[in-house]
């Protein structure tokens, strides 16, 4: 009975929160739009959207007022290409739904169908100011590329941490030395397999009757959509020579490519900028963990930004548990030469534009859904906290399973230690 009453009260609270009109007063608003940074600015949220944005706004009778006192407000943060909601804990494989192990090339595989909007990890990430992530499938089983997967890992959608799913999809392809086990032992075979897959889609008559097919009919339909420019194709690749091959392949195939990882992308900044290929990079990649990343440097982001490449941040290992720490990596990129506003853009506007959700995420503008965070201090400082989080205009609970466990057990531990 107590649990039923709690759930009923929670449902009522959520409904009231959704209907609320809220005025955030006196904030420093980083709009990530042409308006730039607006000091001492009010934000009126009504019906889920930014209804007004300006100084000394009138207070509607029904509005709840949040005094910002100059604290920064930013768009909600991007949590990277992540497994949030499709991975719970690594020791329990029944809730790890990110990898396909059928051993055949299946671009139609879409991990979005396994997304759990009730995952306890979503609440933890929201407390860190994260409001949207790009779901990413993996060709790796147990952390290592093996014969159970293929270089085309599959598709994923952008999901928001209120549990909603965006219609846009991205296709993920694993390349480079780490994917050799998926392509017969050679990175040269990766391009060969991709070229054959494109032939099956565009010019199937060139194949002989007894030629082995890589794709199912459904897979050909899905790949045809990406070859027609509908959706991004993310190539997970680090070595400069492999990135050069991806740039050439993307031009031949006419796909909207993104470099994922890109540890040595800084070596090809001019070429990537000319090809209009963004890079989804790990701001913490600094050590040569393999021969594919000998040129690793914490200045990767700064060098690419100076070259005119659109960058966004994402951990190299798709995360589920620590996506909220990505902003700390952005702060480290600032310490190594990336302008502060560019670092914030790599966590907000840029990934929203790259993955096709810029109409609802990544910026604060009048008329747009209110996807924003009120911070205690500079959000790229490790000691700053998210004080308030709004997703699509709904004020989010600032509690998670972690805070519930803390409040339940910390007083008992303190009492026990005081004895």
Image (spheres, helix red, strand yellow):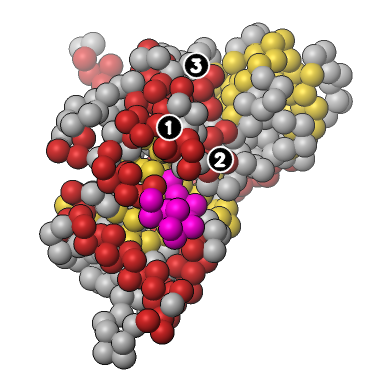
Q: Gap in Å between the C-alphas at discs 3 and 1? A: 22 Å
**Real-space Cα distance between discs 2 and 3?**
18 Å
Asked if residue 377 lies left or right of residue 333, the reply is right
Secondary element under disc 2, as helix, strand or loop, is helix
Measuring from the top left, give residue 406's x and y in whole percent.
35, 27
Label 3 crowd (10 A; few <14 / some 14-19 / many >=20): some
The x, y position of residue 381, in whole percent, is: 43, 14
| Quadrant of res 14 | top right
Please indicate, yes or no, whether residue 33 appears anywhere in the rendered image.
Answer: yes
Magenta range is 248-258
C-beta proximity under 8 Å, tags 3 and 1: no
Q: Is residue 290 magenta?
A: no
Q: Residue at x 27, y 72 (%)?
A: 104
The relative height of residue 208 versus residue 14 in the rendered view (above or below) is: below
Where residue 413 is drawn, which disc sits there? Answer: none
Left or right: residue 408 compared with residue 342: left
Q: Name the residue that disc number 2 marks.
A: 352
User: Residue 336, percent across and down?
Assistant: 36, 15
Residue at 62% x, 26% y is: 32
For label 1, the residue is 270
Is 253 contained in the magenta span? yes
On the image, numbered disc 3 is attached to which residue? 340
SS at mark 3 in the image: helix
Question: Can residue 112 be seen in this snapshot?
Answer: no
* Disc nearer the start of the sequence (2/3): 3
What residue lies at 25% left-to-right and 60% top-to-bottom? 190
* Secondary element at tag 1: helix
- The quadrant in which the C terminus is found is top left
Decide: few, some or many residues near mark 2? Use Cα within 10 Å; few <14, some 14-19, many ≥20. many
């Amino acid at each position: 009975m107590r649990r039923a009453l709690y759930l009923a009260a929670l449902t009522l609270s959520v409904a009231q929160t959704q209907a609320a009109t809220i005025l955030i007063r006196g904030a420093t608003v980083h709009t990530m739009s042409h308006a730039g940074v607006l000091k001492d600015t009010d934000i009126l949220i009504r019906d889920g959207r930014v209804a007004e944005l300006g100084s000394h706004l009138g207070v509607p009778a029904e509005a709840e007022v949040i005094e910002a006192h100059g604290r920064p407000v930013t768009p909600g943060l991007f949590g990277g290409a992540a497994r949030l909601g499709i991975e719970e804990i690594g020791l329990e494989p029944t809730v790890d739904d990110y990898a396909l192990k059928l051993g055949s090339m299946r671009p139609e595989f879409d991990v979005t169908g396994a997304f759990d909007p009730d995952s306890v990890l979503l609440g933890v990430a929201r407390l860190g100011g994260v409001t949207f992530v790009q779901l990413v499938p993996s060709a790796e089983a147990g952390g290592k590329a093996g014969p159970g997967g293929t270089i085309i890992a599959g598709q994923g959608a952008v999901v928001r941490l209120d549990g909603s799913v965006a219609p846009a999809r991205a296709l993920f392809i694993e390349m480079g030395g780490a994917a050799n086990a998926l392509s017969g032992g050679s990175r040269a075979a990766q391009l060969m397999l991709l070229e054959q897959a494109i032939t099956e889609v565009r010019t199937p008559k060139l194949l002989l009757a007894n030629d082995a097919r890589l794709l199912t009919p459904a897979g050909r339909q899905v790949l045809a959509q990406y070859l027609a420019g509908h959706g991004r194709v993310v190539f997970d690749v680090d070595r400069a020579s492999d990135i050069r091959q991806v740039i050439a392949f993307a031009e031949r195939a006419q796909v909207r490519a993104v470099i994922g990882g890109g540890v040595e992308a800084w070596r090809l900044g001019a070429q990537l900028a000319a090809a209009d290929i963004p890079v989804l990079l790990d701001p913490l990649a600094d050590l040569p963990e393999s021969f594919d990343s000998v040129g690793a440097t914490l200045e990767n982001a700064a060098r690419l930004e100076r070259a005119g490449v659109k960058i966004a941040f994402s951990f190299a290992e798709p995360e589920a548990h620590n996506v909220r720490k990505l902003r700390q990596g952005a702060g480290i990129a600032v310490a190594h030469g990336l302008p502060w506003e560019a670092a914030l853009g790599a966590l907000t506007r840029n990934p929203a534009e790259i993955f096709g959700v810029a109409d609802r995420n990544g910026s604060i503008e009048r008329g747009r859904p209110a996807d924003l965070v009120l911070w205690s201090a500079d959000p790229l400082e490790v000691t700053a906290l998210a004080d308030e989080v709004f997703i699509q205009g709904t004020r989010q609970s600032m509690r998670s399973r972690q805070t519930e466990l803390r409040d339940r057990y910390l007083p008992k531990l303190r009492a026990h230690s005081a004895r």
